[in-house]
Amino acid sequence: MNTVLTRANSLFAFSLSVMAALTFGCFITTAFKERTVPVSIAVSRVMLKNVEDFTGPGDRSDLGIITFDISADLQSIFDWNVKQLFLYLSAEYSTKNNALNQVVLWDKIILRGDNPKLLLKDMKSKYFFFDDGNGLKGNQNNVTLTLSWNVVPNAGILPLVTGAGHVSVPFPDTYKTAKSY
């Protein structure tokens, strides 16, 4: 009585419903898993320069240069539903002009199958640490470095997780004038 197209449509709709239910089941098995791990961040060198800001005529801005160490074991985050991790080190601080400044200094993608143990020594910032003015000079224990990550799953939401560990970095009161780092 039913045509071939009607039967194919019914089979397709049923298959799609079963796949949606299975995908939801896959998501729910790891949705409430704790993904925070201890992170150790150490800063070995902080340098501050006052450089020309090319966004305005004759303006100068602070450029922070940081050398840091990071160690973390991210093995417990990886399960069957994790495709990759997007790690990033950010600096948060406040100045007279802005109550909250956030700058990403470094990032890395760890794929499933890569070594999840992070042991980085004497790393330099991957991105420039500019302040839109002179808010870094003399900023004592106000700049906080934090390692965070996005868990990219096979199915489900994309959680943003902050590592259990951060470090406050005091910036110097004077600018470095040498051209070498």
Image: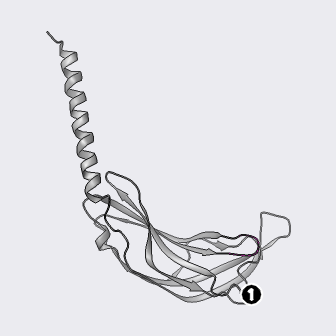
| Kind of residue sitting beneath label 1 | Tyr
47 sits to left or right of 2: right
Is residue 20 highlighted in magenta?
no
Indicate the position of residue 54 as horizontal and vertical percent values.
Answer: 77, 66
Asked if residue 180 can be seen in this view, the reply is no
88 sits to left or right of 83: right
Marks counted in the figure total 1
Looking at the image, which residue is at 72% across and 88% down? Answer: 176
Colour scheme shown = one colour
Q: What residue does disc 1 label?
A: 175
Looking at the image, which residue is at 62% across and 86% down? Answer: 141
* Displayed quadrant of residue 87: bottom left
Please state, as top left, top right, bottom left or bottom right, where the C terminus lies in the image.
bottom right
Residue furthest to the left: 1
Looking at the image, which residue is at 25% across and 35% down? Answer: 17
Indicate the position of residue 83 as horizontal and vertical percent values.
Answer: 32, 58
Please state, as top left, top right, bottom left or bottom right, where the N terminus lies in the image.
top left
Magenta segment range? 94-98
| Within-10-Å neighbours for mark 1: few <14, some 14–19, many 20+ | some
Residue 165 drawn above or below residue 87: below
* Displayed quadrant of residue 114: bottom left
Residue furthest to the top: 1
Q: Main secondary structure of the magenta part?
A: loop
Q: Relative to the observer, which residue lies in front, 161 or 133?
A: 161
24 sits to left or right of 90: left
Indicate the position of residue 134 as horizontal and vertical percent values.
Answer: 76, 77
Is residue 95 highlighted in magenta?
yes
Q: Could you say whether the residue bearing mark 1 is in a helix, strand or loop?
A: loop
Asked if residue 7 can be seen in this view, the reply is yes
Looking at the image, which residue is at 72% across and 75% down? Answer: 95
